[in-house]
Image (cartoon, rainbow, N blue to C red):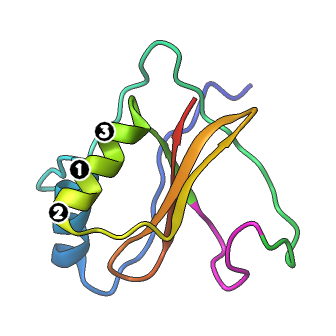
Amino acid sequence: MIKGFGGIFWRTKNLEAVKKWYSEVLKIEMGDWNGTVIKPQLGNETIFSFFSENDSYFPTEQQVMLNFQVHDIDETIKHLEHIGVPLVKKKEVSEFGQFIWIKDPEGRLIELWEK
């Protein structure tokens, strides 16, 4: 029945600042309608997963965590260092890929993943 995700929507306290941050830091070009279309690329996967209320994988006060798949985690780290965005979690390598964490301007933890 489900074809894929249709979108991710959330409220923000400072729309312009958050749009600018996502554009500069993650290079997501935001349209005048306050959003963008991210088209799937070959090899991209979208994970839909639940965590228990007390799971410590990401902060319990954060209900949702975004995970963006990137082409090259090392190039992403260089970009983040160049623009002064600190890593919240240094590169972790596992059987699932390579992961880093950063925070957006409102403190939401974001996971960046290279498969």
* Image quarter hosting the N terminus: top right
Determine crowd level at label 2: few under 14, some 14-19, many 20+ residues with C-alpha closer than 10 A. Answer: few
Return the residue nearer the eye: 11 or 74.
74
Q: Main secondary structure of the magenta part?
A: loop
Spatial distance from mark 3 to mark 2, Cα to Cα?
13 Å
Using residue 41 as the reference point, say whether residue 21 is left or right of it.
left
Dot placed on the residue nearer the N-terminal end, 3 or 2: 3
Query: Crowding at label 3, few (<14), some or many (≥20) Cα neighbours within 10 Å?
Result: few
| Residue 16 position in % (x across, y down) | 16, 75
Q: Can you give x and y, in whole percent of width and height, for residue 35 in the image?
A: 27, 53
Question: In which image quadrant can residue 86 be found?
Answer: bottom left
- 106 vs 31, left or right, is right
Amino acid, disc 2: Ile
Q: Which mark is residue 79?
A: 1
According to the picture, the residue beneath numbered tag 2 turns out to be 83
Residue 77 within the magenta-colored segment of the rendering: no
Q: Residue 97, which numbered label?
A: none
Q: Which residues are magenta?
A: 57-65
Kindly identify which residue carries mark 3: 75
Q: Residues within 10 Å of mark 1 (few under 14, many from 20)?
A: some
Horizontal placement of 85 versus 107: left or right? left
Which amino acid type corresponds to the residue marked 3 in the rendered image?
Answer: Glu
Whether tag 1 and tag 2 are in contact, CB under 8 A, the answer is yes
For image coordinates 85% across by 76% down, the residue present is 53
The amino acid type found where label 1 is placed reads: His
**Would you place residue 38 above or below residue 85 in this image?**
above
Q: Residue at x 56, y 38 (%)?
A: 5
Numbered disc 2: secondary structure: helix
Q: For the residue labelled by badge 1, is the local secondary structure a helix, a strand or a loop?
A: helix
Q: Position of residue 61 (x, y in %)?
A: 67, 85
Residue 20: name its quadrant.
bottom left
